[in-house]
Amino acid sequence: MDYRDVDDRLFDIGRALGCRLRLAVLRTLATGEASVGELVERTGATQSNVSNHLAILRDAGLVAADRDGRVMRYRLASPKVRDLVRALDTAAGGT
């Protein structure tokens, strides 16, 4: 892999992490998958706002989605992303 590719990915991930709502979404998804409606309920943000932020998280490779009938279910893209979320929580003095 080209270093520039890695730098670009790190930049995209860093940008995606630079928002309180996106961090809240990631922390919520670290506990299990959720629909947009469930994320709206948990974060207090509007549906369109949550959807827009999920798109940024997907573009950064942090979140993936699967269709369950008419509902999209979102989850962390990999166990490595879950580890990242946990490491950020620990670094911030959380659990």
Image: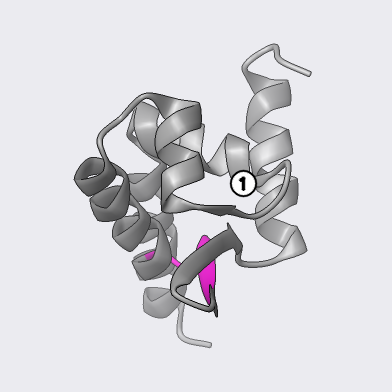
Q: Position of residue 12 (x, y in %)?
A: 35, 59
Q: Secondary structure at mark 1?
A: helix
The residue sitting at 75% across, 48% down in the picture is 83
Q: Position of residue 54 (x, y in %)?
A: 36, 55
Q: Residue furthest bottom?
A: 1
The residue sitting at 25% across, 35% down in the picture is 46
**Which residue in the protein does label 1 denote?**
29
The verdict on residue 64 being magenta is: yes
Question: What is the basis of the colouring in this image?
Answer: one colour
Q: Position of residue 53 (x, y in %)?
A: 30, 49
The residue sitting at 47% across, 35% down in the picture is 23
From this view, report whether residue 31 is shown above or below residue 9.
Answer: above
Give amino acid for label 1. Answer: Leu
| For residue 13, side relative to residue 27 (left or right) | left
Q: How many marks?
A: 1
Q: Residue furthest front?
A: 69
At label 1, counting other C-alpha atoms closer than 10 Å, the crowd grade (few under 14, some 14-19, many 20 or more) is many
The verdict on residue 62 being magenta is: yes
Q: Nearer the viewer, residue 92 or 51?
A: 51
| For residue 25, side relative to residue 8 (left or right) | right
The residue sitting at 31% across, 62% down in the picture is 55
Magenta-colored span: 60-66
Q: Nearer the viewer, residue 74 or 53?
A: 74
Q: Position of residue 5 (x, y in %)?
A: 40, 78
From this view, report whether residue 88 is shown above or below residue 92.
Answer: below
